[in-house]
Image (tube, helix red, strand yellow):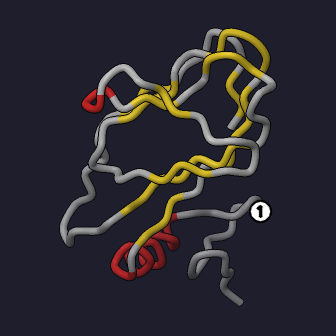
Amino acid sequence: MRLAPGICVRTGIIRPRAPRIESLPVTISLNSGEYDGGDLRFPKLGKRTYRAPMGGAIVVSCSLLHEATPVIRGKRYAFLPFLYDEAGEQLGRQNARFLADDRGEESNSLGGQED
């Protein structure tokens, strides 16, 4: 993800549908120190902001409201994977059939393709 000056990301609480699936968003900083702003904030925890060093990560629960503050200078680059429990992986495999690859062919599993 790239955030340019003046852009912020606000996100709410992500509530997965039954069955209960634990999902942990991860923010891995790719260029900490090359921008101003763009820090993570957790409104329920107060006004403090958080920034991982380059290559460092911040992992939170999807049940915690979080946002990225506006980038004031430079560009912020981050890798934003999600970590799931076994139920989440299973659900992802089931839902992968609804995804199409870049050739418009449907996938039979996460990262897989029907033969």
Left or right: 110 in relation to 64: right
**How many neighbours does mark 1 have within 10 angstroms: few (below 14), some (14-19), or many (20 or more)?**
few
- Examine the rendered structure and indicate whether residue 24 appears above or below residue 105: above
Residue at x-position 69% and y-position 12%: 5
Give the labeled residue for mark 1: 103
Q: Quadrant of the N terminus?
A: top right
Towards the viewer: 98 or 54: 54
Is 73 rendered above or below residue 17? Answer: above
Give the residue type that dot 1 points to: Arg
Q: Is residue 39 above or below residue 83?
A: above
Q: Position of residue 98 (x, y in %)?
A: 49, 65
Q: Residue 24 location in percent, x, y?
A: 42, 58
What residue appears at the point 38 percent right and 73 percent down from the top-left corner? 88
Q: Quadrant of residue 106?
A: bottom right
Quarter of the image that includes the C terminus: bottom right
> Is 66 situated left or right of 28 in this image?
left
The secondary element bearing badge 1 is classed as loop
Q: Quadrant of residue 64?
A: top left
The one nearer the camera, 4 or 30, is 30
Q: Position of residue 61 (x, y in %)?
A: 35, 53
* Residue drawn where x is 69% and y is 16% of the image: 36
Q: Nearer the viewer, residue 79 or 97?
A: 79
**Residue 77 locus on image (x, y percent):** 74, 35
Q: How many marks?
A: 1
